[in-house]
Amino acid sequence: MCELLGMSANVPTDICFSFTGFLHRGGGTGPHRDGWGIAFYEAGGYRDFRDPHPSVRSPIARLICDYPIKSHIALSHIRQANVGEVRLANTHPFTREMWGRTWCYAHNGQLEGWQALPLSYYRSVGDTDSEHAFCWLLGELRSRFPAAPSQEEEQREGFWRLLHLLCEQLRGMGVFNLLLADGEYLYTYCSTKLAHITRRAPFGKAELSDAELTVNFAEHTTPDDIVSVVATEPLTSNEDWVRMVPGELLVWQHGKIQARFLDEA
Amino acid sequence: MCELLGMSANVPTDICFSFTGFLHRGGGTGPHRDGWGIAFYEAGGYRDFRDPHPSVRSPIARLICDYPIKSHIALSHIRQANVGEVRLANTHPFTREMWGRTWCYAHNGQLEGWQALPLSYYRSVGDTDSEHAFCWLLGELRSRFPAAPSQEEEQREGFWRLLHLLCEQLRGMGVFNLLLADGEYLYTYCSTKLAHITRRAPFGKAELSDAELTVNFAEHTTPDDIVSVVATEPLTSNEDWVRMVPGELLVWQHGKIQARFLDEA
């Protein structure tokens, strides 16, 4: 299984603390030696760093820990390859442009029969089930929403419902835990395993589970900050993480849950 | 004016030497303080590093110099903003997926009336003339070639001729020096300023123009290596660079020129 890490915040926030714990799972405390990647949305722009080597020894990963990039949305993935060999083209996150926005995607799990999902606007560069599912997902969204939905409640809801439906369809094909973002929203969908925590004033201390590191968020925040972190497994040992339920889609914006969709079966 | 740097090689080659000289132009010997980026094609995969800060002081740029990433094709850009503010979304290179390949693009120059170029498949994320022209260019190519041209001489030539025609059209709108790549080929198009050099056995020494650094390529190469470098201005002081002529498109593969198209006016 791969590992996922996502962040949504109402102020530009660095992810160094969480990432430090997270990257130890890439060949340190975890078996995920087959590459890693991290993506940041900063002031309307997007960039990612990807490396097909174990994160725990990667000089690029060290840079990310030492050079605090502040963003509203970040997402990261550590890979344990199952479908597709270990190479850069198969390293998450994957990105495509839709409606003039950079969409970024990372997947944990494995799908069966994914080759049959029909592609339209977007094609895979690598050969993983994950990227194929992303191309299908985005193509389906685009064919139903050729332009971005307006900010009207009804339009926006309709788009999110469609996304939830497509995720449910993918869950029917195997395991599909998802992080997806477009710079405005972070979407997290749980098939088997995802947990989240929201930190806000009064801020306290947090201790990493995977590395010997404690941070006192009170020293790094202002009283209005709201920062949420989503991960495959809780990253800290002294906080109460909320586990998502299978079939649940959460829509995050500015560190808060804006909408929630559940398995209706 | 921005600065461009490209490389095509027949073996995975690092671009550290050229990039070291090049990045001094980003706020060191040059006035290009408005961000920089570099892209690598490695074993069928793609990644880029972009930073909206001056390259000469960028920790990410330092990493690129110290951590030799070996690739067949690399391209880099240092920005001096004219259209569009200094921010990540306006930082070259730009990328889009077409036919399951990652296309990467960097532009030097300025266009007039670019807003009128009609967009189809691809939309701008930022607000530069450069990215708009890229989205238009790729959209035109895709509408005429919905699938990749076959490797047949005629098909391939037809695609390259179309690319040349579109570049000529953009040159008619201002200054359009271009680096474009798809992982297989590197395309370089000259509107006003681009120069290139091909290094092969017997390899000699090269001295950077912008920094005090000499490299003896004979120590880092095998007799079969062919490495070509393209840049806005020659990067070394003791080698003979070939200047491209306005309206010239070169198609590079494995370090060699595969095709050449000239202004027919």
Image (cartoon, coloured by chain):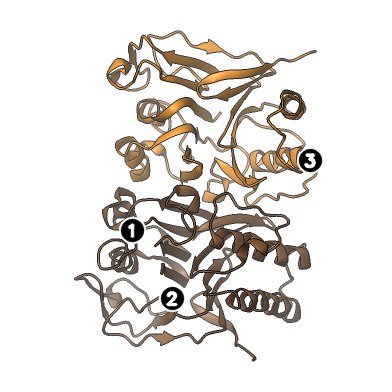
Chain colours: A orange, B brown
Task: Compare residues B122 and A57 and report the one nearer the observer.
Answer: B122
- The mark that comes first in sequence, 1 or 2, is 1
Asked whether disc 1 touches disc 2, contact meaning CB atoms under 8 Å apart, the reply is no
Query: Disc 3 vs disc 2: which is toward the camera?
Result: 2
Image coordinates for residue A106, horizontal then vertical, percent: 58, 35
Residue B197 located left or right of residue B217: right
Instruction: Judge whether A206 appears above or below B263 on screen.
Output: above
Report the residue at 35% width, 79% height from top.
Answer: B234
Asked whether disc 3 touches disc 2, contact meaning CB atoms under 8 Å apart, the reply is no
Q: CA distance from mark 1 to mark 2?
A: 21 Å
Task: Compare residues B167 and B113 and report the one nearer the observer.
Answer: B113
Q: CA distance from mark 3 to mark 1?
A: 45 Å
Image coordinates for residue B176, horizontal then vertical, percent: 53, 73
Residue B33's disc number: 1
Residue A171 seen in this snapshot: no
Image coordinates for residue B54, horizontal then vertical, percent: 32, 55
Q: CA distance from mark 3 to mark 2?
A: 41 Å
Q: Which residue is mark 3?
A: A117
Q: Provide the secondary structure element on which disc 1 rests.
A: loop
Task: Compare residues B230 and B228 and report the one nearer the observer.
Answer: B230
Q: Residues within 10 Å of mark 1 (few under 14, many from 20)?
A: many
Report the residue at 60% width, 14% height from top.
Answer: A244
Query: Disc 3 vs disc 1: which is toward the camera?
Result: 1
Pointers 1 and 2 within a single chain: yes
Residue A55 located left or right of residue A39: left
